[in-house]
Image: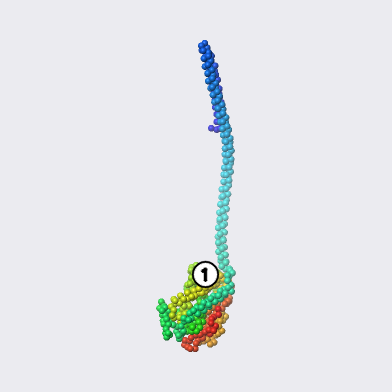
Amino acid sequence: MPPSSLTTTLYYGVGLFGIGIVSFASLTMTKLFHTFPRLWNRKKPTNNDHVKKELEQTISQKDAEIQQLKTSLSASEQELQDVKKQVEHGNQRKTELEGRMMEALVQKENLENELVGREEELGRVKEDVGKVQEALKQTQTLLDFRTSELKVAQGSLSRSDRFSGADVTRMIETLNTEIHQTATIMADEFVPQLQLPQGGRGVESGVGGGSSESGTTVTTVNEAGVGVHEAAVVHTEDILGESMTKMLQTFNHREDNILLQIAFQASMCAFTEWIMDSWCYHHRDSEVELVLQETYEQLRETEEQPVSARWRILTRRYVRQLYPPVEQPNLAYHIFAACANILIAAGLSHEPEQLLLDKFAARFSKRVADIVERAIHLNNAIGDDITSCEFVPIYCTPDVTFDPSTMEAPFENSGSAGDGAAGQQGQEADKILCTTDLGLLRAEKVQGEERTWHNTILLKPKIIMASDLIASPSSTDSPGWKSRFSDAGSTDS
């Protein structure tokens, strides 16, 4: 029921209630006045006092009832006032709630309008985001393409070299010094154990081998059934050449250890040059090394210098990933094996081959490890850090003709036949025996021309000539060799 109807009903109820009370009081008084005459007439003759008393009691009762009705009326009026206040409070609350409801409706309408606007804005933002994402995708694609182009362009551009020619030259010279010092100590260590030459015939040695006082040959064989001395001679010839190996077999090493020192130097130069030139430290004749080197030789002759240099650097990087690097002790083993074979070929007959290897490893592992480490560092320097040119270590193989423009013979009579080795005539006297110090070549491709290079010798390799050694006149068939430079005691380094 609405508050206004409730108020009206209350008003009518209270009014009717008051009218009822007044009517009831009037009716009571009327009845009372009508009763008095009857009582008076009925009892007048007999008992007036008694009638009076009854009337007084009746009046008293009616007064009490009237008072009670007045109290009830007052309470009803108070209740009516309370109801009025409640109605007024309810009306105020209603008005307040209606105001809030109107505000809420307005706010709801505003929010709905704002929501519609936000949804429209969100739609536009999504559309813009889609456009931005598409533009970003296109930009990323373009960036990838440009990056690829940049990498290709960088491969065609020259970058500054990390090492100069002087830097690499110093590295080679330091390596040569290390090799010379190590070879000298090795020769001093093992010369006392060598036998005297016996008519040009080497003394076979190996596991269980020994020497006889009468000079007879004691022959032992290795696991493959080949004479140990024979195998050592073949191995030494592969490195030092046939001429140098024959001299090792007939040279009086106890009188002068220079030839043994030279042999050690030459073998270490050969192996360190191989390390510096290697792509992945496989055997020089391995298929991997041959294919890579032949490919690079063809590329460097036809492409521009920056292109071939970039190919070299990238190829070396990925070859190292495909082929794990060879551990340094395995590289050092090749040097120890070469030196052990040189000793066996030179006449060390009472030491098993494995025992010789163990002695070399125990005595010279630190020095040889330093030599290998320097060679590996040079391999990385000239292979990974040089693009403007190429640095090529120079090692002259045995029996090539001496060329004073590219080689250095440190002894006075080197390079001429003179009174040199017996039986050597004409061009034979101009053949080198071995290389004792590595050299360095700087090669720069002439731009725009194929197979045209500008070469500069930065450091000449030092070589030993056959004319640096003379034959002892005691034997013409199998001469005992001596050195022209025995007074010098060693080669320059």
Q: Is residue 148 left or right of residue 201?
A: right
Q: How many marks?
A: 1
Q: Is residue 285 above or below residue 74?
A: below
Element on which disc 1 rests: helix
Q: Is residue 346 above or below residue 303?
A: below
Res. 144 image quadrant:
bottom right
Q: Is residue 19 above or below residue 112?
A: above
Res. 66 image quadrant:
top right
* Label 1 packing within 10 angstroms: few (<14), some (14-19), many (20+): some
Asked whether residue 230 appears in the rendered view, the answer is no
Type of residue at label 1? Arg
Pick the residue in front: 176 or 433. Answer: 176
Q: Is residue 351 left or right of residue 446?
A: left
- Residue 262: where, in percent of width, then height? 51, 80
- Residue 280: where, in percent of width, then height? 50, 71
Asked whether residue 185 appears in the rendered view, the answer is yes
Q: Residue at x 51, y 12 (%)?
A: 47
Colour scheme of the rendered structure: rainbow
Q: Which residue is mark 1?
A: 316
Q: Residue at x 48, y 81 (%)?
A: 191
Q: Residue at x 45, y 77 (%)?
A: 356
**Split into 4 quadrants, where in the image is the C terminus?**
bottom right
Pick the residue in front: 390 or 26. Answer: 26
- Residue 345: where, in percent of width, then height? 46, 81
- Residue 432: where, in percent of width, then height? 52, 82
Pick the residue in front: 356 or 472. Answer: 356
Pick the residue in front: 105 or 378. Answer: 378
